[in-house]
Amino acid sequence: MEVALLGLCNWSTLGVCAALKLPQISAVLAARSARGLSLPSLLLELAGFLVFLRYQCYYGYPPLTYLEYPILIAQDVILLLCIFHFNGNVKQATPYIAVLVSSWFVLALQKWIIDLAMVCPKYCMGPGAVAHACNLNTLGGRESHPVAQARVQWCDLGSLQPLPSGFK
């Protein structure tokens, strides 16, 4: 029973991840525009997925614990290529893809590199800082975009105000 439930969870996660960005990809292709996509946000997401996937492979975790990451990476690469295609120059994507591919090998050169890549974001920018530093704009926001947009905005974290007492 437990094995069947675990298998269902694993395969349902893969299914959800396979379909997660398909609406966004189809909206970009239908609009024939990359308007609303943020290159820095997409690169940040790709880097995070790549580091996590490499860490899982490096330490020999079972494939079913990380198979969603290659699916998400492939979808992000498609969106990356869409950005450059609809902006008129696919060749500009070459350095970004080269850095991502070379990172796969660099991360595994030494154990401390992959460990640092996993630990550094946790201590440099914890979950609370990331939540306050990211501004997500979606459909129905100030601007009308055919695609949901995620944009990272860095701010002075010392200027954040505490939550009102009702939200604690």
Image (cartoon, rainbow, N blue to C red):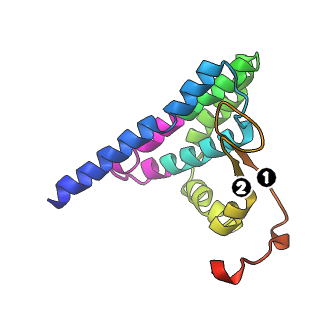
x%, y% of residue 112?
58, 59
Q: Amino acid at mark 2?
A: Cys
State yes or no: discs 1 and 2 in contact (Cβ < 8 Å): yes
Which residue sits at x=56%, y=28%?
Answer: 25
Q: Which residue is mark 2?
A: 134
In the rendered view, would you say 107 is above or below 118?
Answer: above
Which residue sits at x=52%, y=51%?
Answer: 52
Residue occupying the far bottom of the picture: 165
- Magenta stretch in the rendered image: 55-74
Asked if residue 63 can be seen in this view, the reply is no
* Magenta region includes residue 69: yes
Front residue of 54/133: it is 133
Q: Amino acid at mark 1?
A: Gln
* Magenta region includes residue 73: yes
Question: Which quadrant is the C terminus positioned in?
Answer: bottom right
At numbered mark 1, what does the secondary structure look like: helix, strand or loop?
loop
x%, y% of residue 164?
72, 79
Mark 1 or mark 2: whose residue is earlier in sequence: 2
Question: Which quadrant is the N terminus positioned in?
Answer: bottom left
| Distance from Cα at disc 1 to Cα at disc 2 | 6 Å
Could you say which quadrant of the image residue 15 lies in?
A: top left
Q: Which residue is mark 1?
A: 153
Q: Residues within 10 Å of mark 2 (few under 14, many from 20)?
A: some
